[in-house]
Structures are given as C-alpha cells and as structure tokens.
C-alpha cells in the first residue's frame, strides 16, 4: 500500500509512543472505581478488562525489547494466548488506584525500554511476529491508541492522526478477504487500495472512520459507505485481526 507511517523515522515513532502513553496516563488520572467497572466500547469487556490488557501487553512488549538488547528472543506471553486471556480476566476487577499503579508501572517500563535503544537496536530480532524491535514499537503504538479509544471515556477515532490511520490500514490489509480489493476513498480525496483481488468494492468515509471500521470498531451510522459496480451495497465482510501468536 505504501503509507506515510511507513516512512516514520525511529525518533518520530518514539515521539508517537510518548504521546500515546501520555494519553493513557491522562485517562488513568481521571478514573474512579465506578468508572473502571463501567462497560468499555469492546463487547463483553469492562474498562477494567481494557486496562488489564494494556498492562499485560505493555509488559510483554517491554520484555521483547529487553531480551532483544541482550541478543535473545522470548515469547510474547509466557503460556501464550491462554495465559494472556487469564491475566486479563483476573486483572479486570481492580480498583482505580490499583490500575493507576499497575498500568502506570507497565507504561513506565515499556517506554523506558524503547527510550534506551541505540539506533542499531531498532533492527534487533524479536520473537513477536518474527520481526524486529521496530515492529514491537508499532504494535505498542496500535495498542495504546486503539485501546485508549476503547475505554469509552470520550476519546474516539476522530482523534487518531493521519500517520496512525495510514499505518493501521497498512497493518490491517490482511483482513481484506482473498479475491477482493477494498478501494478506500477518503473525504480528503485520498485513494487507497487494499488487497489484491479482482473484485473491487469502493468504501468511502473519513480516514479515521475507515481505519476504525477495518479495525472492527463501532462507527457512526452512514459514516462509511460501500459501492460495487455503481450500486450502494452493505459494508463488506472483513477477515480476522492478524494474530500476534500466528508467527511464533
């Protein structure tokens, strides 16, 4: 696809991480015990589930970096998907103060890990997606920005930057079903092609809404529209989220 985000320097990506971390910290400072028990924007998850997941993924990505700096690799989560899910369920009932402590500590650790990198270490191999440290940084960016919105405390995809949306669309291109192409047309006049199929569906909307739709997030009625062979059609089905465990 080719995106603006793909051209981000490591220093710019690090700045994006700092901004995303600050956004989550802002929410942590405002949350009460009642607020953390409130349903999030994710079906079946409270805000506590989202925060427990943020704690876990921050710690998981931090150790990807820490091991990579020693020339070693480690699984994303000890125990894989089962352990990850169990930790979220067990951590979902904490108090607001406990989340401030736990998530705050995890944010400190993961940001410190990326800030400690030497220039050449951004290309150090990690087990996560059989990639490099830079891939882990992009993953952290996605997790922080998207789940900040998932908390449902006022931040929505309308606050996502153009760089972030372009990166997210690029990352989520595998969700386009085989044999199809999504021809995205933004209100800003961009034309973005995802997929390599022969059957093209035009999908129109604001860049932020298109990114949120492909991420499987709730969007306003009519904010994204689809067209096929000149006729309005329902929004196309999309495939599963690219699994963080598929390439271990």
Image (cartoon, rainbow, N blue to C red):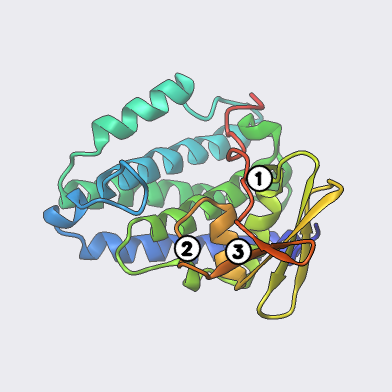
Secondary structure of the residue carrying numbered label 3: helix
Secondary structure of the residue carrying numbered label 1: helix
Q: Residues within 10 Å of mark 1 (few under 14, many from 20)?
A: some
Q: Position of residue 20 (x, y in %)?
A: 47, 62
Give the spatial CA distance, label 1 vs label 3: 23 Å
User: Which residue in the structure is indicated by mark 2?
Assistant: 219
227 relative to 128 in the view: left or right? right
User: Which comes before the other along the chain, label 2 or label 1?
Assistant: 1
Compare residues 65 and 195 and report the one nearer the observer: 195
Q: Is residue 193 above or below residue 113?
A: below
Residue shown at 24%/63% (left/top)?
29
User: Which comes before the other along the chain, label 1 or label 3?
Assistant: 1
User: Which comes before the other along the chain, label 2 or label 3?
Assistant: 3
User: Which residue in the structure is indicated by mark 1?
Assistant: 135
Compare residues 67 and 48 and report the one nearer the observer: 48
| Residue 215 in sight in this render | yes
Judged from this view, the residue extending furthest toward the front is 231
User: Which residue in the structure is indicated by mark 3?
Assistant: 210
Q: Position of residue 72 (x, y in %)?
A: 63, 26
Secondary structure of the residue carrying numbered label 2: loop
State which mark lies toward you, 2 or 1. 2
Q: Is residue 28 above or below residue 126?
A: below
């Amino acid at each position: 696809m080719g995106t603006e985000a793909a051209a981000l320097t490591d220093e710019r990506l690090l700045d994006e991480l700092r901004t995303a971390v600050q956004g989550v910290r802002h929410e942590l400072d405002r949350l009460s015990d009642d607020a953390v028990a409130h349903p999030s924007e994710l079906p079946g998850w409270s805000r506590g589930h989202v925060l427990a997941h943020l704690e876990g993924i921050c710690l998981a990505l931090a150790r990807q970096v820490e091991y990579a700096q020693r020339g070693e690799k480690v699984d994303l989560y000890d125990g894989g998907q089962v352990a990850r899910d169990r930790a979220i369920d067990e951590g979902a009932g904490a108090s607001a103060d406990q989340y401030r402590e736990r998530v705050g500590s995890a944010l400190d650790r993961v940001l410190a890990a990326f800030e400690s990198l030497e220039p050449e270490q951004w290309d150090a191999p990690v087990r996560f997606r059989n990639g490099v440290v830079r891939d882990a940084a992009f993953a952290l960016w996605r997790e922080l920005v998207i789940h900040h919105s998932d908390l449902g405390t006022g931040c929505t995809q309308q606050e996502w930057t153009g760089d972030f949306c372009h990166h997210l669309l690029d990352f989520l291109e595998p969700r386009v079903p085989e044999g199809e192409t999504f021809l995205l047309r933004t209100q800003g006049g961009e034309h973005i092609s995802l997929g390599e199929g022969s059957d093209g569906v035009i999908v129109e909307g604001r860049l932020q809404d298109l990114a949120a739709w492909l991420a499987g997030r709730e969007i306003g009625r009519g904010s994204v529209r689809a067209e096929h062979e000149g006729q309005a059609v329902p929004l196309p089905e999309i495939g599963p989220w690219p699994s963080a465990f598929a390439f271990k």
